[in-house]
Image: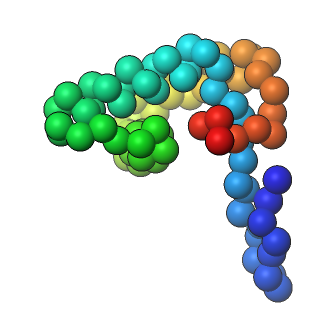
Amino acid sequence: MATSKSQGEQPTPRRARTLGPDGEAMLAELAQEVAAIRGKAPSRSAVFRALLRLARDFDGALLHRLVGLIEIEGTAGEPEGQDILGH
């Protein structure tokens, strides 16, 4: 699903793939670890956005690892078109 677009603008995707049970568990665990460090629980969305920023800033070696993980995730066969954070 996408937002409506103005003249000449590309639509902004509002939804992505749904996290499966393993992904939800990893995200919850990471959020708990962040809460233990900062003393305040982050939203799952904030954790996910921070992970996206980290992925963007990866150096070459870590980027290759990320590509490998994406290949594995791409074969997981989860349904498309649902909100990635389950909202």
Quarter-of-image position of residue 75: top right
- Residue 14 seen in this snapshot: yes
x, y (%) of residue 46? 42, 46
Would residue 53 appear left or right of 85 to someone viewing this image?
left
Q: Residue at x 23, y 40 (%)?
A: 40
Which residue occupies 36% across, 30% down?
31
In this picture, residue 7 sits left or right of residue 37: right
- In this image, 27 relative to 67: left or right? left
Front-most of residues 18 and 12:
18
In this view, 54 is above or below 12:
above
User: If the image is split into quadrants, where does the C terminus sit?
Assistant: top right
- Viewer-proximal residue, 40 or 49? 40
Q: Position of residue 11 (x, y in %)?
A: 77, 66
What residue lies at 76% left-to-right and 77% top-to-bottom?
A: 9
- Asked if 38 appears above or below 22 in the picture, the reply is below
| Residue at the limit of the structure toward the bottom, as seen here | 7
**Between 55 and 31, the one nearer to me in the picture:** 31
Q: How is the image coloured?
A: rainbow
Residue 84 in view of the camera:
no
Q: Residue at x 49, y 17 (%)?
A: 25
Task: Say how many tags the image has.
Answer: 0
Q: Position of residue 61 (x, y in %)?
A: 39, 28
